[in-house]
Image (cartoon, helix red, strand yellow):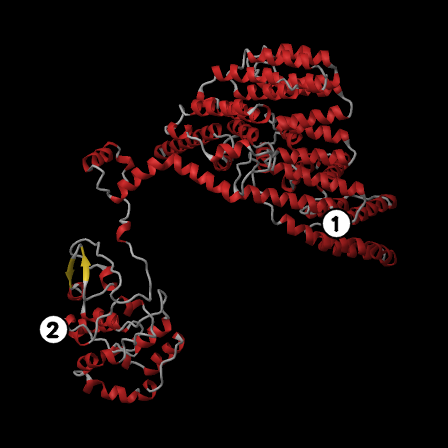
Amino acid sequence: MAEGGRNSIENHAGAEVKDKTLSENVMVDKYNVEAAEILANEVQHLPISEAVPIYEQLLSAFPTAAKYWKQYVEAYMAVNNDDATKQIFSRCLLNCLQIPLWRCYIRFIRKVNEKKGVEGQEETRKAFDFMLSYVGADIASGPLWMEYITFLKSLPALTVQEESHRMTAVRKAYQKAIVTPTHHVEQLWKEYENFENSVSRALAKGLLSEYQPKYNSARAVYRERKKYVDEIDWNMLAVPPTGSYKEELQWMAWKRFLAFEKGNPQRIDSVSSNKRIVYTYEQCLMYLYHYSDVWYDYATWHEKAGSIDAAIKVFQRAVKALPDSEMLRYAYAELEESRGAIQPAKKIYESLLGDGVNATALAHIQFIRFLRRTEGVEAARKYFLDARKSPNCTYHVYVAYAMMAFCLDKDPKIAHNVFEAGLKRFMHEPGYILEYADFLSRLNDDRNIRALFERALSSLPPEESVEVWKRFTQFEQTYGDLTSMLKVEQRRKEALSRTGEDGGSVLDSSLQDVVSRYSFMDLWPCSSKDLDHLARIEWLAKNINKKVDKLAVLNGDGSTDKGSLSLTTNSNPSAKVIYPDTSRMVIYDPRQKPATGFLPSTTAPGLPAVSSTLSNPSVSIVGGGISNAFDEVLKATPPALAMFIANLPTVEGPSPDVDVVLSILLQSNIQTGQTGKSGSPSAQLSAGPAPTTSDLSGSSKSHPIPSGSSFKSMRERQSGKRKDQDRQEDDETATVQSVPLPRDVFKIRQIQKARGGTTSQTGSASYGSAFSGELSGSTG
């Protein structure tokens, strides 16, 4: 008993350690779905006091996970803590429109009110109405309607008037349910028919004929809606988008579902249709909670539908859900400003600025523009003076305010002063120099433009001055004379030549310079082919030295010192790359002559070279020597395999006809590997010519099939010892052998079955006869 208690303590301690580890994983990676699922399963076995902080942690990361809310509330219901249960339902019900969670809610309400009599029944009925007003349009809400109708039927009716009220309530519930496209719409229609017929057949006929078309429409819409619903993963947790394929599929599925609902497929009134669209959006946000585009679409849909207040509420929820999304804040401020609510819009901009220390340059710029639109020039100027003192103020703020003063206020003097003030601070920024030059170009102030470029280029390092030199050159090509143009181009080359390794080639003049000087917009003094050629020549000129060195190393040029090459290689082992010997490569040609080309053997010593079987077998040139390579290969080849290779037919190209090869091999008699009685493979093959490159890969029109007369004497010597033994079997299969073998493999196998067990003894007609013959010879 003590041992059992100790095991229980150890198990509990192990469970606590495991839960702590999972909780730490969730804290490290807030949206770790796998860890959250495991933690949610483990927390069910903990007491409520220990489970509460874990549930709160899970729901802070996944606030729209209805299954976690349901699990949380059921834990409180299990310990009969009604106050905590109500509080949790108030936090989650309106944001988690999922049927299982709402059924849990109605179960709790019925449990609380079951002993309160009439008052409790009225509270339960109100809870049902509240529930169906939110989730009654769900495709899975059929059981809710059935439960509601059953509840209404169970209400006591002591008087005729109460009975009439009850029947009216049941009829209304049925009539709402049968026009809602749900999984149980057909079952609800049958129950409604039975209900009306049980009350009054005369009245039922008129009511059923009235609602029959509505029911048919709901059933048709249900079938269409089900196609979209089936594409959605209803167990998915809301996580920030990662770009995974599954997430994109779910996003597209929800977009299709929303487009379907916006089309009003049931042709109901606009109020009911809008209510269904809102419900679909709310369900979508349960799973795409972190998608800013879904929030924006939801808000703009409300705006287009004329419900500005609803759009503002959606934006407020969106900003709370995604506090780091500047896009949603700007869209929200834009909506407030467009309806004339300046102060709420200003508060949104101020929330983007925060305390001003961590505000971005873009937030400063957009707030200056907002103040200029709503409060005037003076307010914008005043804030600019404050914003430029911010540590996060970049040159973009200066450019934005200067251009606003120039374009909107029509005051080039203030704009010029702003640019000059910023130049003292951002002289090292090429982007600021270019913007200042554009501003001076608008003023047609060429003297100050040249002065600006000279000041900037004297302070900028060469590697950061590329774009400034380019703009300076373009300016001189447009506004300068030929002398100043050529002078700036030469200075540009000299300055940029210090940044590259091939500075000498940059200093050389090229046609690219002429093209640059005499082109305008999309007009060029040459064709596109000439442009491609010039670009290619320029690239080759920059890489000519590197390419020569690489070729010298790869080809083993005699001018390259071997000692220096090995030293270079050893000094950088990671850069050592083994390249193929391209000088020994030959082009494959199935029509080549037997004496043309050769494939040198590059295999290790002691291994047969595969390439030598494809080359000329009589003369093989390796390193300048001549040897009979084919005989060497045959000495190391088993007799059966040698005969199998000898019987291979010539083919047309690299892809032989399998049926032809099988037909020839099935008609061949391969020896059974009796090496003791048979001669050497080279002696057996001496009567017929060995297969050359052209024999194996050349045209079958110029070379006969090797299974013909070229191997006739050889086959006679091989099969002479077995002629008497096989004569009886040949007589039995003469009717089959006399018919030429078909090209179809299936028919070949049928012929093999027709021959019976005789073929398996000889090994001449079985599939892969050479190998079966080898096996039988070795075992016999």
Q: Residue at point 55% right, 11% down?
A: 424
> Which amino acid type is shown beneath numbered disc 1?
Pro
Mark 1 residue crowding within 10 angstroms, few (<14) / some (14–19) / many (20+): some
Locate the C terminus and report the quarter of the image it occupies.
Answer: bottom left
Q: Quadrant of residue 96?
A: top right
Residue sitting at 21 percent across and 69 percent down?
642
Dot 2 falls on a residue whose secondary structure is loop
- Whether residue 780 is visible to the viewer of this picture, yes or no, is no
Residue 575 position by quadrant: top left
- As drawn, the residue found furthest toward the left would be 676
Q: Earlier in the sequence, mark 2 or mark 1?
A: 1
Q: Looking at the image, which is closer to me, 569 or 679? A: 569
Question: Which residue was labeled with disc 1?
Answer: 265
Vertical arrangement, residue 528 with respect to residue 76, above or below: below
Q: Which residue is mark 2?
A: 676
Where is residue 249? Give x, y as percent.
Answer: 57, 45
Q: Are marks 2 and 1 in contact (CB under 8 Å)?
A: no
Q: Quadrant of the N terminus?
A: top left
